[in-house]
Amino acid sequence: MRFELLGTFACREVEGGQTKNRVVPDKMGKKALAFLQYMIVNHGRNISSEELIEQFWPDTNSNDPANALKNMLFKTRNLLKAMFPQQENPIKTFSGCYGWNPEVAVETDAEEFERICLEVRRKSGEEYLETLLRAAALYKGDFLSGNDSSWAMSLRRYYQTLYLDVCKMSLPLLQERERWTEVIGLCEQASAVDVSADTFITYQMQALIAMGQPERAIGTFEAFRERLWEEFEIEPTEQVEQMYLLAEGLCQNHMDGGDILKLVAEGEPDSHAFLCTFGVFQSIVALERRHLSRTGGSSALLHVSLGNKVTPTTDARRLERILLEGLRTGDPVARLDAGSYILMLAGVSAENARLVMERLDRAFHKAYSHSRACISFRIFPLQADTSKA
């Protein structure tokens, strides 16, 4: 019997070198399925009645958990008989415990995956990489993804960690060999397991750029950035931003003279302030400081944040909207964290910057009168960069 525990739970029967698929009954209850899966995961040992009762009937209202266990075993044996009609009595009763019939060979893809991960340490060269890829190919999804039992979730985290480590070890080797399609495929699968990991998005963007597809790299970055903000309310790391700027630069380098002129002079004007990444914001501020060293003018940086009595995501989105719609076209704005922004007002004194923020504060509470948010701000006069003077 072969059971697939990584991804969709499935059963196979291997006989005479041939594999036959076995269907898990659709009407199988959630608890009965979890019980069967527990028996499968622990197929290498006999399990006591006390352990099974503690695991599946810890707070039962029944006065007879032992009878509930017997009924569950009867149901499980009938399910196995329906799935594997050729196998005789796969689960046996021993003295005070239950276990798999020694004459029935049981294997799982999770155990095979773990074994290959351990084998990697003894490999080198091309064999090392191919063993890593063989392990990665076995991971078709999270361990028993539909099982929310504590024992299943702890094992799920363990196998996730193993898989992500395999991917991280594989990617630099695939990159070195310029196997870009495999890099992209591995990154897409790994990102589904850990959506916040910047390692995978960085390698994926590098591969797309190497394949001459900077537009796809930009799209990948934008989707990653949106997902990060929606789920964790954080921005991409500087390393990811640098890959984005590289892809953006390559897209512009592909343009001819007419396209570049259209891009910089004839583009559709945006009526809002400019929401950018923190890395881009830093570059804009550096340019403004150089400008101030030549003109002697004044500009201001503002740190704007929400108070504690807020609905985090909702009020942050509201504040962002007020900033983008209420500031001048092109004023740069960047997120620092959830409910906190930094912006630059070029050619504006500290006193005028205060008047701007008071106006935006009134606009916020007029538009969202029921919000309990209290907007606070700090103003920092921007200093000229005298090092280039």
Image (spheres, helix red, strand yellow):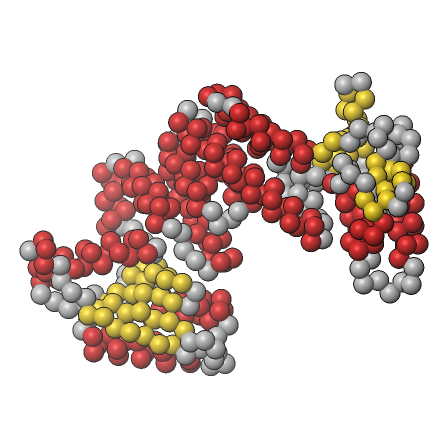
Q: Nearer the viewer, residue 196 or 35?
A: 35
Q: Nearer the viewer, residue 364 or 118?
A: 118
Q: Nearer the viewer, residue 323 or 238?
A: 238
Quarter of the image that includes the N terminus: top right
Q: Is residue 346 visible?
A: yes
Give the vertical position of 29 relative to 273 (above or below): above
x 65%, y 46%: residue: 155
Q: Nearer the viewer, residue 292 or 79?
A: 79
x 41%, y 73%: residue: 306
x 25%, y 73%: residue: 379
Q: In the rendering, at what x and y percent does residue 108 appear?
A: 72, 34
Considering every residue shown, the one lying at the far left of the view is: 389
Give the vertical position of 3 relative to 354 (above or below): above
Give the vertical position of 296 relative to 41 (above or below): below
Q: In the rendering, at what x and y percent does residue 304 appear?
A: 34, 71
220 sits left or right of 26 in the view: left
254 sits left or right of 131 in the view: left
Q: In the rendering, at what x and y percent does residue 326 appear?
A: 34, 71
126 sits left or right of 331 in the view: right
Quarter of the image that includes the C terminus: bottom left
257 sits left or right of 304 in the view: left
